[in-house]
Image (cartoon, rainbow, N blue to C red):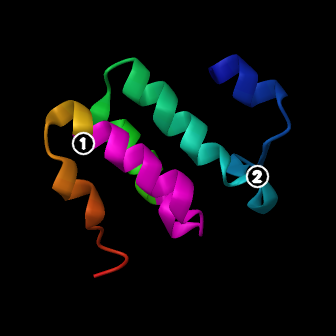
Amino acid sequence: MDEFERYSGLFKNGEIKQERRQYEYSRGMYYEGVGQMDSAEYHYRKVLFYGYPFEGYKGLLSLYSKKGMTDSGLYCSCCS
């Protein structure tokens, strides 16, 4: 993942380009797949903050379904 991010052109000066911020969803899926649930939640919430509610809530629902806490994905600090 590090090599892809280094050579993909998604980042400028270490920050993800504004028009590519939806990539945070993919990062969340990666971290969820490798079992780093806290990192996955961080990236799903970040994609919500950037204005992609479908991807953000889809990721959180997937994450919380695995934890058995499906109602928890409906709440986030940015919306309450």
Q: Nearer the viewer, residue 28 or 75?
A: 75
Residue at disc 2, secondary structure: helix
Can residue 61 be found in the magenta stretch? Answer: yes
Q: Position of residue 53 (x, y in %)?
A: 52, 64
Res. 64 mark: 1
Left/right placement of residue 76 relative to residue 59 reads left
> From which residue to which does the magenta span run?
46-64
Q: Nearer the viewer, residue 54 or 49?
A: 54
Q: Position of residue 22 (x, y in %)?
A: 66, 52
Compared with 33, 8 (above or below) is below
Name the quadrant containing residue 34. top left
- Residue at numbered disc 2: 20
Can residue 10 be found in the magenta stretch? Answer: no
Left/right placement of residue 9 relative to residue 11 reads right
**Tag 1: residue type?**
Tyr
**Label pair 1/2, CB-CB below 8 angstroms:** no
Q: Position of residue 8 (x, y in %)?
A: 83, 30
Task: State the predominant SS element of the stretch in magenta.
Answer: helix
Q: Nearer the viewer, residue 54 or 76?
A: 54
Q: Earlier in the sequence, mark 1 or mark 2?
A: 2
Alpha carbons under labels 1 and 2: distance apart = 25 Å
Q: Residue at x 66, y 44 (%)?
A: 23
Q: Nearer the viewer, residue 36 or 61?
A: 61
Q: Residue at x 86, y 38 (%)?
A: 9
Q: Looking at the rendering, in which quadrant would you find the N terminus?
A: top right
